[in-house]
Amino acid sequence: MSEFKITRRQAMQRLGAGGLAVAVANLAGTQAVFAQENKVLKIRNDGDMERLDPASRGGWYDETVMFAIFSGLVRYGDGDNWDWELDAATLLDDSDPMNIRFELRPGIQFTNGFGEMTAEDVKFSFERFADPAVNAVYGSDWAALDTVEVTGKYTGVIRLKEPFAPLFTSTLPNASGLIISKKAVEASGNADIATDPLACSGPYQLAEWRPREIIRLTRNPGWVGPRPYYDEIELYPIADVTSAETAFAAGDLDCTQIAVNSIPAYEGTDNTLTVKPALGYAWIGMNVENPKLADIKVRRAIQHAVNVQEIVDATFGGAVDPAYGLVPPPLLGARDSVLYGYDPQKAKALLQEAGAEGLDLSLTFGTDPDIMIVAQVLQAQLAQIGINLSIRQMDSATMIAEAQDNEGGGYKNIDLIIEPFTTTPDPSWVTEWFTCEQVGVWNFQRTCSPGWDAKNAAAVKETDPEKRERMYVELQNELEETGAYIFLYHGVNAWVTKPGIEPAFKPDAQIAFLRDFKAS
């Protein structure tokens, strides 16, 4: 990491902090003492809880909690490889990929008196993804499921109706594979789960939640798996990464994610610095239903006007490479070039052909400070071809609500948008959000092609790696051909942890594996 350079934004961060001893408002009054001395871990969560339902979770800020309070048959291991290991299961036999046998660890107790985890809970947890009342956001993770056959108290068979390549890469080890209590959900009278998990089945349980202040986890006495080191974990929802770094420097946090440009500040210190390539993807999306962007010549002009290399260099100081598509390397289907690169003269000619000189557009994005740099560089680049770009930065939740406002027409306010996504180690999780069904949900470009959707569905079933790779490259080619996508970067995830703590993360370091943190 010695080649990382401190950029203008990092210097501004240091000045803007007003002294790193300043505490974040919702942490004020805490003592700058290493929390692990009392076997309490204090860690930043980059968002507050929204939904703790495996079928309709909000994002990684929910998943960080969910991986601690729920268990699955298997889970991702801590390390650099996307291998899975047994969790609530003592056996998972995938020798027949269409009929996967499992056996649960006896004695796992759900909290709140809902009894022992059984194969009936596994059946309920997976089959509910197809229940219309659940309205599963992640229904595609179990689209190939036929049924879960219960063969005993702790045993069963996951039967698929068709091949499903992502089952062991992005479904079972991920949050869609977490097991919830059938009795607890039925007793609640609701089909889904909100911020109350109803019953926990993992090493920890939710003990306290003060919205926008703290999420406190304590040991689950009914957990019979490997015992976690910490008695208690306090998660502080801090959206702004600069504020989180300030809290860490003040001793109010034991561990936090940091900005890429802050990495040099922690190199050579006693802290543990963790930096891993991200399975993320950031792109500029264009709303094709917006009249100003309806002409593909205008969208193509914008594609040619953007110098992505210049954007990532200005934003990350050489630490991050440009993206060539949505699928991040090293995943199957990652591209090595774009179809419509930087060519400002061609961009000007296309705008002239479309009669769109002097066009006024806006760029909408959340509070990520990195994207503010992206926006400023993009603003200058579009000005060079005669497009006036205004910047609309807002709270991410507000932005998403506007982009998803189909009935009220809020989506019409979106011209250009940047909303980075994260993914799992399978390309199906990357492309899933750009179907016709996702228009107005997560497909903010509102591109829709039944033919593209059919190819996307076929790619999930393809088990030949070479064929599957070609399919995902072609899917990205077709998205770029719409003119509505400009690929930016995949990035890295960086964390800093206090001395005396051995942290644990998902292989891309997007999520902290709280149950695996321990003393070093």
Image (tube, rainbow, N blue to C red):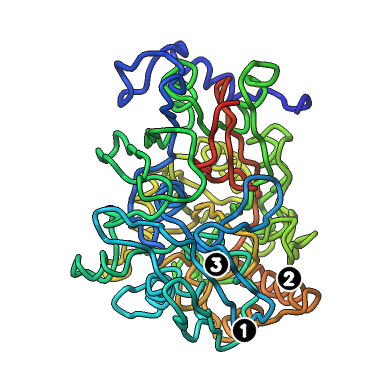
Image quadrant occupied by the C terminus: top right
Residue at the spot of label 2: 473
Circle 1 crowding by C-alpha within 10 Å: few under 14, some 14–19, many from 20: some
Name which of mark 3 and mark 1 comes first in the sequence. 1
Q: Which mark is residue 171?
A: 3
Residue 80 in the image, given as x and y percentages of width and height = 70, 46
Amino acid of disc 3: Thr
Amino acid of disc 2: Val
Amino acid of disc 1: Met
- C-alpha gap between disc 1 and disc 2: 27 Å
Q: Nearer the viewer, residue 294 or 68?
A: 68
The answer to whether the residues at label 2 and label 3 have Cβ atoms under 8 Å apart is no
Which residue is pictured at 24% across the width and 56% down the height? 113
Secondary structure of the residue carrying numbered label 3:
helix
Residue at the spot of label 1: 98
Residue 359 in the image, given as x and y percentages of width and height = 51, 56
Circle 3 crowding by C-alpha within 10 Å: few under 14, some 14–19, many from 20: many
- C-alpha gap between disc 3 and disc 1: 15 Å
Name which of mark 1 and mark 2 comes first in the sequence. 1
